[in-house]
Image (spheres, rainbow, N blue to C red):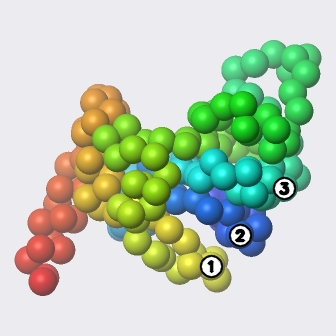
């Protein structure tokens, strides 16, 4: 299980440019969705990669599924050599994605996000519409229940406007 608070506070307190996506974003929008990891969309600019490396360093990130004896250096240079990182950390699984299927690159994801106050920080979270687009584009069976919740939320929001 992921310590969502520690992950978000680490990213926000280091001024990382990120958007909370996936199951945690679903949960922020008041659904009863349970997730075991946290997914972040992130900007790949050089300065931001250094901030991510610093933000997550104390959680001992390692590539998920790789043998523990495999050397792994967690730094901005490593982050610059990839665009998707699935990490095991001391606080749980963290996934970093520079693009989101159905939405595009970080700037597109950011444009489909909204601000929420979480643990004392103003945090970008993928919007209900953004989540519907992304989860539909992913086409995964595991996303069907969450999509039903999101559609109900969108319907309730349009009724309240």
Q: Residue at x 45, y 61 (%)?
A: 110
Per the model, the C-alpha gap separating discs 3 and 2 is: 11 Å
Identify the mark nearer the N-term, 2 or 1.
2
Rendered position, 9 above or below 96: below
Residue named by callout 3: 54
In the picture of the structure, the residue carrying the numbered disc 1 is 121
What is the crowding at mark 1: few (fewer than 14 residues within 10 Å), some, or many (at least 20)?
few
Question: Label 2, on which residue?
Answer: 15
Marker count (numbered): 3
Indicate left or right for 121 with 157 as reference: right
| Secondary structure of the residue carrying numbered label 2 | loop
Residue drawn at point x = 70 percent, y = 44 percent:
92
Q: Residues within 10 Å of mark 2 (few under 14, many from 20)?
A: few
| Res 107 seen here | yes
Circle nearer the viewer, 2 or 1: 2
Please tell me in which quadrant of the rendered image residue 90 appears: top right
Camera-side residue: 109 or 156? 109
Q: CA distance from mark 1 to mark 3?
A: 18 Å
Instruction: Point out the tag, 1 or 3, that comes first from the N-terminus.
Output: 3
Judged from the image, the secondary structure of the residue bearing numbered disc 1 is: strand
| First of labels 3, 2 by sequence position | 2
Residue 120: percent from left, percent from top: 64, 82
Do labels 2 and 1 touch, CB within 8 Å?
no
């Amino acid at each position: 299980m992921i310590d969502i608070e520690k992950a978000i506070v680490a990213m926000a307190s280091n001024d990382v440019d990120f958007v909370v996506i996936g199951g945690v974003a679903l949960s922020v929008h008041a659904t009863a969705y349970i997730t075991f990891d946290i997914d972040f969309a992130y900007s790949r600019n050089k300065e931001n990669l250094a901030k991510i490396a610093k933000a997550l360093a104390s959680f001992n990130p390692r590539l998920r599924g790789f043998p523990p004896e495999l050397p792994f250096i967690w730094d901005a240079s490593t982050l610059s050599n990839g665009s998707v990182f699935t990490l095991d950390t001391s606080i749980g699984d963290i996934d970093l994605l520079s693009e989101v299927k159905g939405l595009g690159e970080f700037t597109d994801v950011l444009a489909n996000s909204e601000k929420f106050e979480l643990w004392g920080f103003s945090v970008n979270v993928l919007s209900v519409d953004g989540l519907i687009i992304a989860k539909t584009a992913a086409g995964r069976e595991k996303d069907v229940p969450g999509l039903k919740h999101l559609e109900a939320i969108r319907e309730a929001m349009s009724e309240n406007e």
